Image (cartoon, rainbow, N blue to C red):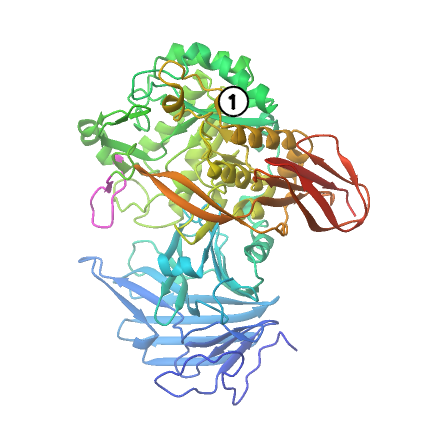
Amino acid sequence: MASALRLLGVLLVCAGSPVPAQSAPQEALLRVAGQRIALGLDPRSGDLASLTVDGREMLAERSPWYRAQLTDPGSRASRWADAKSAESIRVEEVKGGARITYTDSANRLKVIVNLETAAGEIAARLTVRSPADRILEAVQFPVLRLKARPGSESESVRLFMPGGDGYVVTHGGLRGNTWNGRAYPGHASMQFMALYDARGGLSLQCRDARAEPKDLQSVYEADPDLLEMRLTHKRPFETGRGFESPAVALLPCGSHWTSAATDYKAWARKQWWARPKKGEARPPAWLDSHLVILHGSLRPLGNGKHPVPLDRWPEVIRSLKQATGAEGVILDVREWEHKGIYTSPYYFPLYPSPEAVRNWLSAAEAEGARAMAMVSGLQWMIERKEFRTPSYVVTAFDGKALFEAQGRQVCVVNRDGEVQVDAPYFNWDGSKAKICPATLFARLHFRDTAAKLAEAGFRIFEFDQMNGGDCPPCYSPSHGHPIGPGIWIREQIARRIAEAREEGRGRLPEFATSLEDPCEVYLPHLDTYVGRAAHTTEWPANGEGSEVVPAFSFVYGPLARPLALDVPLTVYPDPYQLVLTARAAMSGAVPCTSLGWYSILSKYGPNDLLPSPEKLDPAQRQLLANLMRARSGSLREYIAQGEMLAAPPVDLKPASIAFRRWERDRNVDRRITHPEVLANGWEKPGGERAYLFVNIASEPRAFRYPVVVRGGARLAVNGGTPRNVPPGEGVEVSMPALSAAVLLIPKP
């Protein structure tokens, strides 16, 4: 039987391309085989000596199954142990799999690796028994030293990583930035990785329902063109504590990230964090209406001028609704904090005054707008320097005395016993520490902040600057939590989100919670999240040669509900804004704009700063309006209720797009190769499908889209009158410049 384990008396590694010769000659291997994936184990060392998928060798060189970090609790000095230090290694066949037992007397370790075939995949588990007087601080398992190019070509090679929405990396991107790692839960939103090319490849998927802390890492080595894919499990800082890993599935994947994501989805959607929300747990109904997001600020520009005085916000809201057809507006208006943007944790009284903010929000609500407050999460800002340009200003902040008096005792303590203080990274940033989420201060802080924001009229509490719920482990012995890493971190953060939601909803039933970047374990307490699938190489991607993909929305579908916040639009021609607008739409995110907030001054001067759709670059204004028209019909129902499809791309030649982008503190000229017409699709529970096409080209584009239509399909361009689509294999689509089209296909 193909899925059964077979022990071949003399089995040389001969399938596909052989693993390079080792210092010792190749030996007969113990083979663990699934339907399409097979492992070859060295019977003497237990090393993974072969890993084939569909007969193709994926391994670049023999891989040790584990590395264990042992730490002396007194000196806190560490050393790493692996199979090479074991004096006894037993490799044996067991029913349905194999077992490797390592006895390492020098390090007083006993390690057992269990391998089991099931349902087309191979599940690996690790057990570590550690010495009573040492801390088992981290365990790397499994460790796979893979070919960075599974085949002979590099053009189609992709690494998928679960950072934020998810991102993929080309082979050139691996060479340019060799480290791809994300901490879970936090900067990694899910628990799987994949390496593949045009013929498919391998996915590593952790089946950890407890959501223990771990790093998902893929590290490139140029010589010999190798990618080490591994999980680093981070353990509590306690002596004598062993480790039993969750199952880690190794399984084949296809030639696109959606293949690996589909397999992960089948497991993930059965977990506790993915239960459908009912009753009071459901997001407020207004989030399902036809919305657009508007960015802005309550403070003046660097030249002292206010683009929008408080009494003129209703006028700006009306103009945006009229230009886009939106039913409502989400106001992402910043600088409401008393001492300047992001000056956490003491935000109140609100700027410019509590009464002024309440009146502003009341007037905005009368026009169908609801405001979101970006709350600086666990940050405790200590000090910040002023940064000023004519169109932008960041206020100086000196909170050193307050931090010493109140903050130091409640902030995260690092492994060395010192409060962790981070240096500023952006011009809006300052030196800051992180509040430990387990402290009484954290519990009171988030409840109080939510209460005051709700009383002022804010409708969304967004946990900002703690991307995906990221928080470093705290080693303080006085905060009332276990020392170091552990599930206590995500449990405490979940409670803080839930408490903020409860406190806000007690005052405003429409109150909602959001998080900067998604993470699966916080879904039960979130109504929405800030997504960045619009981005190409920017965060959460890993720079040039990488690209963000909407993997989180693909896996979690109607539970996801992303908001797009990084698509400002400008008053000047900028093709990259068109790219961002279209890419955000592909993730199902609510569209957004700042109406050119920070670019108006340079074009219109200091006496004509009021943002309006008419001042936007015409191409950007047209694409946003057409996209909003396309979303005005039933498409939103498919996005809100349906599952994202693995939609085929449009078969048109991509374009070379040159643009200028602000990066940290300067403009940088960039060029990307990108499709001009993007496509994605969603399917309702009943089987009805909707496909969205967005054309960012300044000219019409026509193509044949490869979907089967059996009858009753309709195609509408820019929200116009739908036309009937004849049955057949493929749909002819003609799109005007800067347009959006929706194809609706009834259930089969």
Residue displayed at 31% across by 29% down: 344
Residue displayed at 57% across by 48% down: 555
Q: Is residue 415 one of those drawn in magenta?
A: yes
For label 1, the residue is 613
> Does 547 appear above or below 171?
above
Query: How far across and down, in percent of the image, does residue 633 sit?
Result: 68, 30
Q: How many marks?
A: 1
Query: How far across and down, in percent of the image, does residue 35 sit?
Result: 62, 72
- SS assignment for the magenta stretch, majority: loop
Q: Amino acid at mark 1?
A: Pro
Locate residue 470 relative to residue 729 in the image: left or right: left
Answer yes or no: is residue 184 visible: yes
Q: Is residue 46 one of those drawn in magenta?
A: no
Query: How far across and down, in percent of the image, does residue 356 sit?
Result: 39, 11
Task: Out of 674 and 139, give the one closest to the viewer.
Answer: 674
Locate residue 703 relative to residue 390 in the image: left or right: right
> Does 695 appear above or below 319?
below
Task: Out of 220 and 687, give the one closest to the viewer.
Answer: 220
Residue displayed at 55% across by 39% down: 582
Locate residue 627 relative to residue 242 in the image: left or right: right
The residue range painted magenta reads 410-423
Name the image quarter holding residue 43: bottom left
Residue pushed farthest front?
699
Residue pushed farthest bottom?
10
> Does 250 appear above or below 487?
below
Query: How far across and down, in percent of the image, does residue 526 sit?
Result: 50, 35
Q: Helix or strand or loop: what does disc 1 sit on?
A: helix
Answer yes or no: is residue 539 visible: no
> Does 638 appear above or below 196?
above
Q: Quadrant of the N terminus?
A: bottom right
